[in-house]
Image (cartoon, rainbow, N blue to C red):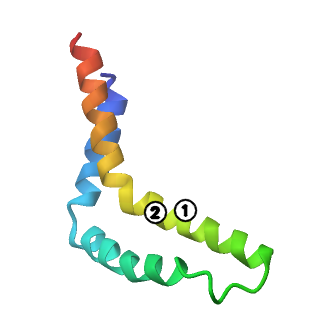
């Protein structure tokens, strides 16, 4: 694995090990729950906006898992 890519993942995992990241993940759960309710949506434009917000929050929520999988795959590829 390229040293720059190794550092990228090490920095990402270091960030995710902080108390601030843990707090952010805890804050995201109620935000996702609130956005995942379409009963208060007033039109297609607002629905599309909520979908975008939900998409970003879901990406953040799954970033650690996705990063871990990508890092493991890269390690396997470089060891072949």
In this picture, residue 71 sits left or right of residue 48: left
| Point 69% across, 84% down: residue | 41
Residue occupied by mark 2: 58
Q: Is residue 36 left or right of residue 17?
A: right
In the displayed structure, 28 sits above or below 61; it is: below
Cα distance between the residues tagged 1 and 2 = 5 Å
* Contact between labelled residues 2 and 1, with CB atoms less than 8 Å apart: yes
Q: Position of residue 20 (x, y in %)?
A: 28, 73
Of the numbered discs in the image, which one, if any, rests on residue 7? none
Q: Crowdedness of circle 1 by 10 Å Cα count: few (<14), some, many (20+)?
A: few
Q: Identify the image quadrant of residue 25.
A: bottom left
Q: Residue furthest top?
A: 80
Q: Position of residue 37 (x, y in %)?
A: 55, 82
Indicate the quadrant containing the N terminus: top left, top right, bottom left or bottom right.
Answer: top left
Q: Residue furthest front?
A: 39
Q: Would residue 54 be found to the left or right of residue 61 on screen?
A: right
Residue at figure coordinates x 73%, y 78% from the top left? 46
Quarter location, residue 50: bottom right
68 vs 5, nearest the viewer? 68
Q: Position of residue 6 (x, y in %)?
A: 29, 33
Residue 40 to residue 28: above or below: below
In the image, residue 27 above or below residue 69 = below
Q: Secondary structure at mark 2?
A: helix
Q: Residue at x 27, y 16 (%)?
A: 78
Q: Name the foreground residue: 59 vs 24.
A: 59
Q: Give 38 or 48, whichever is nearer the viewer.
A: 38
Residue tagged by mark 1? 55
Horizontal side of residue 3 vs 57, given as left or right? left
């Amino acid at each position: 694995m390229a040293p720059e890519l190794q550092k990228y993942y090490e920095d990402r995992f270091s960030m995710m090990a902080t108390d601030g990241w843990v707090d952010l993940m805890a804050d995201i759960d109620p935000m996702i729950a609130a956005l995942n309710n379409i009963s208060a949506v007033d039109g297609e434009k607002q629905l599309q906006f909520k979908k975008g917000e939900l998409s970003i929050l879901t990406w953040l929520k799954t970033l650690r898992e996705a990063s871990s999988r990508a890092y493991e795959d890269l390690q396997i590829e470089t060891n072949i």
